[in-house]
Amino acid sequence: MFIYDSVQKTKREFIPLEEGKVSLYVCGPTVYDDAHLGHAKSALVFDLLTRVLSANGYDVTYARNITDIDDKIIKKALTLNQDIKEITDFYTAAFHKEMDALGVGRPDIEPKATESLEAMHEMMQKLIDSGHAYATKDGDVYFDTSSDSEYLSLSKRHQDEDDKQERVASSSLKKNPTDFAMWKSVKDDSLTYESPYGKGRPGWHLECSAMIEKHLAQPNTAFAVDIHGGGADLLFPHHENEAAQTRCSSNHELANYWMHNGFVNIDGEKMSKSLGNSFFIKDALKEYDGEVLRFYLLSTHYRSNFNFNSEDLSTAKKRLDKIYRLKKRLFGLAENSETTPFRDELLKVLSDDMNVSAALALIDEMISNANETLDTAGKHKVLKRETISNLAYINSLLGFGVKNPFKYFQFGMNEDTKERIALLITKRGVAKKEKNFEASDTLRDEILAFGVTLMDTPTGTFWEKV
């Protein structure tokens, strides 16, 4: 397996720290608002990575944090006059629900900042004791960037004094303009947490470093984790500062491989809440089936910037439809997990830095060949067994073709209409059983008036939206 290391800027063969096992840490959401397509893209990329690693026989331990301490959360709570935990619990649950709709598996470990304060305090104290951090008279704690000779080795940049380092206001008591906060004292009545340095709140960068050491890092290793991932916008300052804290407190580097996914643009413009063009996942799911969004957002290479537009989304849906139409032709037959040349080739291209373009080209070719052969060979058992195996593997490896193929084509119909159609189909089934064909035909016409097609199969009657 090969992974593009975004720090070394080269594709490297993946060799885990411990044979057969992989530790993966990905920066998760700050839960103060609805998740947008940028969050979806990152979550989907690393969901695919865990699937590919597992398919290659690795035992993967995947951690993704929840940031539930942040000034934005406090501001929202004050604006809405709600409890902080009420805000963070609500948006955490919403994030999980939306990830479920996209077919994103839950991480093995999902630590919260509020549950990791002790680990943060321990790391801060180690850095203070070793001279890499200092506490000010106001009760703030800063990392001394001048103490780390390797600082900026991750992002390979020359830092200006104006570079934004913190999510909280800077202090005139910093030794260097580039020093970043690990703990910020709070003197007002807003939410604070206890620490050996006084009441305050932790810095954003400290959170992930402490969580990695607590949950994933092993003693006497050169790296805390095998792979650290996140969006490209996190490389600096977030990941740079994480790496510095870990390097100076634990005597090992943070990650052996760094992976960063590209930005999501909306009609050519970078998506951001500050620009007011964020496309929330919850709104996208009102318009599109979650699996269609999954297919679309994974249809370009993870390192490329993704330009979201309705034309490309429509094209992606038609491509996914082909998987479901083939699945429909084989509906009712037992699933098959036999290996096939297609399965081997699909894993091979996805193991090459998740080359999804090559993977989708293979899938298109398999579907075309299967349909052509089914048209000519009819009920050829060997072909059907092989095709079912291929579809099952696409499902497990990429998360495409998960749903009942008939129900997949029902998206967009409201629940009341679905219930009425289901009732009419039941009545029609009774009429057919009683050989009341006139009533059966009348009920069929009533069903078709909803703008659907009917399919009678050995396992039941199904319908699709036209």
Image (cartoon, rainbow, N blue to C red):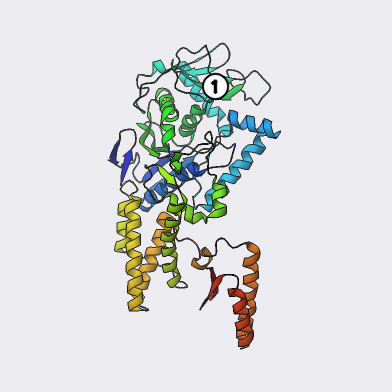
Q: Quadrant of residue 345?
A: bottom left
How crowded pointer 1 is (Cα within 10 Å; few <14, some 14-19, many 20+) is rated as many
Dot 1: element: strand
Q: Quadrant of residue 235?
A: top left
Q: Amino acid at mark 1?
A: Trp
Q: Residue at x 34, y 69 (%)?
A: 370
Pointer 1: what residue? 183
Q: Is residue 229 above or below residue 283?
A: above
Q: Residue at x 30, y 52 (%)?
A: 349
Camera-side residue of 371 and 315: 315
Residue 410 in view: yes
Q: Is residue 320 above or below residue 277?
A: below
Residue 56 in view: no
Q: Residue at x 50, y 52 (%)?
A: 102
**In the image, residue 80 lies at what x, y percent?**
69, 35
Q: Is residue 366 above or below residue 166?
A: below
**In the image, residue 297 lies at what x, y percent?**
44, 49
**In the image, residue 304 lies at what x, y percent?**
37, 42
**In the image, residue 38 lies at what x, y percent?**
48, 42
- In the image, taking residue 60 as reference, residue 446 lies left or right, namely right
Q: Is residue 126 above or below residue 39?
A: above
Specify the farthest residue to the bottom.
Answer: 435
Q: Residue at x 67, y 38 (%)?
A: 86
- In the image, taking residue 340 as reference, residue 201 lies left or right, namely right
Camera-side residue of 180 and 321: 321
